[in-house]
Image: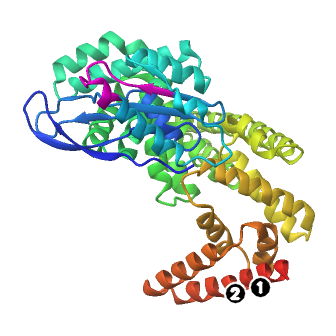
Amino acid sequence: MPYFEPQPMRVKCPNCGAELTVPVFTIIDAKDMPDAVQALIIGALNVFQCPQCGTSGLLDVPLMYHHGEKQLAYLYFPTRVNMPQPERQKVIGEITRALMRTLPEDHPKGYLLRPREFLTLPSFLDAVMEAEGIDKEILEERRRKGEIIDKLLAVVDDNLAFSAVVGQYKDKLDAEFYELLRYARETAQLLGHKEEAEKLERLRQKLLPLTEAGKRERALDKAVEFLRSNPDRKQFLQRLLEAEDDIEVEALVKVARPLADYAFFQMLSERIRQAERQGDKEKAKRLSALRDRVLEITQAVDKATEDALNQAAALLRTLLSAPNLEKAIEDNLDKIDDTFLFVLTAQLQDARKRGMREIANSLQRVWNAVRRKLRPDVPPEILIIEDLMGLDYPDGTREYLELVRDELSNDLFTLMEAVAADLERQGMKEEAKRLRAIRGQAMGVLAASTA
């Protein structure tokens, strides 16, 4: 099912009268538009923000939520949309037909002819949340934190009022709050609300030094920035010695864990012995405490990593043995993270290297299915090309092409040539030549299968 693109809508600011263009969604699909569904739930979908006066609000427009697997169609038609009944039915009909045109011919369509209508946003959101399987209590807490974000945004440039609001809600500004704040910023960026995203990031930066959770967030930001400088062990140790507090030490060790190896601890121990030889007991004590703390953090990180890898490996075994792979992935989607993808790709590469073709093919099927689920908006032809460009030619690409033989088509070959031509225009002649060679190989695989 395709991604339903938002349509531009001209809006007049109710406060200052300025005109602006806003992207507006009229249909969101649960399966292929999860980001839009989440934006709807947290109140970031179909909203406007005036660039002149900063006024923001929700647009009163009809919106269809569709869940094909559950055969659900919910229509929010705001009561404030003052429209004669014939026109109202015409709008509903246009939305319904646009949705029906995207469905497979054998998909049931009766429920679309009788969408459940909602006149108020809260009742519409409650139904959507129930369909998405979201715990209402958890969501209510997230909503309350969303309201706090709105209140802080309104006074972010007024230091006195800002301090008052922070003081009122300081106990709510926890790790989950900052996670929600990041998500709101990312959603605003996704929906093209650049000014709103910038304001949310400004709010985040202003809050970071004011709370314990914020300090941890800021320490991680600084640690990541330090790691980008590609430090060695000596620079890592110096940065640990300059850390403001234990929060910063913990963040540095977690982010730069590979640097805290045996050679690092040898270097640190030598520093301690040197301080003792010089009679600097205070320095030796401080360095010893740092060594103990770094060791404690690395052990905790390694234990968490080991647990995560074991869980990822167990999930991979579950998917490999599942009678219905697509359903198994859907049921475990919340467990598919970077660690799982690392384990999957590592095992796939190892199986190929060892010549374990049957196992490699099974792992490749899981990889393909997971990628389609995680990137539903990307055409499968693009995913195939991306995979092929990362494989060894000709052996690795031939094995992959045999696995995706049923997906080889003239459309794919046409796209491969277009991508090769584009690479050539960019001066990437070797890459273009390689892709054309893979294209010829793919055409040969398809021809052999139809012979």
Report which quarter residue 431 is drawn in.
Answer: bottom right
Report which quarter residue 47 is drawn in.
Answer: top left
CA neighbours of label 2 inside 10 A, class few (<14), some (14 to 19), many (20+)? few
Residue 422: x %, y % from top left: 47, 81
The residue lying toward the viewer, choosing from 7 and 141, is 7
Q: Which residue is mark 2?
A: 440
Residue 79 lies within the magenta run? yes
Q: Secondary structure at mark 1?
A: helix
**Vertical placement of residue 413 versus 71, above or below:** below
**Image-based side of 75 in relation to 105, left or right:** left
Q: Which residue is mark 1?
A: 444
- Looking at the image, can residue 93 be seen? yes
Q: Secondary structure at mark 2?
A: helix
Which residue is at a point 46% across and 45% down the rendered structure image?
98
Q: Kindly indicate whether the residue at mark 2 contacts the one at mark 1 (C-beta within 8 angstroms).
A: yes
Which residue is at a point 77% across and 78% down the rendered structure image?
446
Residue 174: x %, y % from top left: 46, 21
- Looking at the image, can residue 45 be seen? no
Give the amino acid type for the residue marked by disc 1 in the picture.
Gly
- Residue 154, label in figure: none
Residue 381: x %, y % from top left: 62, 67
